[in-house]
Image (spheres, helix red, strand yellow):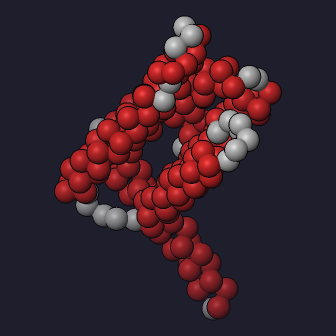
Amino acid sequence: METTEKQIDEKEALKVLSETISVAKGNLDDGYFYFVLWGCIGALVALSDYCLIKLNLRDYTGYGNVLYPVGGIISLLFSKQQNKKQKVNTYIEKWIGYVWIAFAIQATLLFNFLSMSKELISIVPAFLVLMGGATFMSGILVKFRPLIIGGIFFWGFSVAAFIFSSETQYLIAGIAMIIGNVIPGLIYRPIYKKENV
């Protein structure tokens, strides 16, 4: 009798987990937006800095960083709109939120500590490592392989960034943002629509 109850409990647990992931994917139908938005912003900032350096306009690099607060405002407004139409709040959504909160805290600390450092240390490789971790974990949580692969690509690009010059690191970061965030985000939207038609 105990074995039968245990099997039923295990089946129930797997069913609940499967339903939770399905609900999370349904709630995350607009989650692709964040990956595309932040991937585009990151790529635009990195590639514009790379171009400015190549054009001997190094003094103008960094001005593109104003796009990050703009992206934050857009994300906040989009999130509020999304929360109004959202039906169920799942643990997976909360975990993904915590992953990206941890990323934001780590990136902020990293930027601040490195900017105070007297030694010239490039932030790009470390930033790509953090992006890889957050993207990889997001992919694992929603079981979406392109995000998992995107996270792995971020890690690969971070290794390349350590090898190349600081100016080339901006080019690498721009490409990494497109491959690691924008492409998985664009892939997710049609798949979600197809599953929920």
Residue 79 seen in render: yes
Q: Does residue 85 lie above or below 6 as drawn? A: above
Q: Residue at x 71, y 37 (%)?
A: 120
Left-right relation of 156 to 113: right
Q: Is residue 47 visible?
A: no
Q: Nearer the viewer, residue 21 or 130?
A: 130
- Quadrant in which the N terminus is drawn: bottom right
**Location of residue 43 in the rendering, given as x and y in whole percent from the top left corner:** 50, 26
The percent coordinates of residue 67 (x first, y second) are: 37, 34
In the rendered structure, the answer to whether residue 160 lies left or right of residue 184 reads right
**Left or right of 2 on screen, residue 47:** left
Placement of 63 over or under 85, stated as above or below: above
- Identify the residue at image location x=77%, y=32%: 162
Horizontal side of 28 relative to 45 (left or right) equals left
Q: Position of residue 38 (x, y in %)?
A: 43, 37
Outermost top residue: 55
Q: Quadrant of residue 32?
A: top left
Q: Position of residue 195 (x, y in %)?
A: 38, 40
Q: Camera-side residue: 81 or 71? A: 71
- Identify which residue, 51 or 77, lies in the foreground: 51
Residue drawn at (44%, 34%), measured in percent from left and top? 65
User: In the rendered image, which quarter contains the C terminus?
Assistant: top left
| Residue drawn where x is 51% and y is 34% of the image | 181
Report the number of discs: 0
User: Residue pushed farthest bottom?
Assistant: 1
Corner quadrant of residue 31: top left
Q: Quick one: which residue is furthest to the front in this view?
A: 118
Q: Where 164 falls versus 15 (above or below)?
A: above
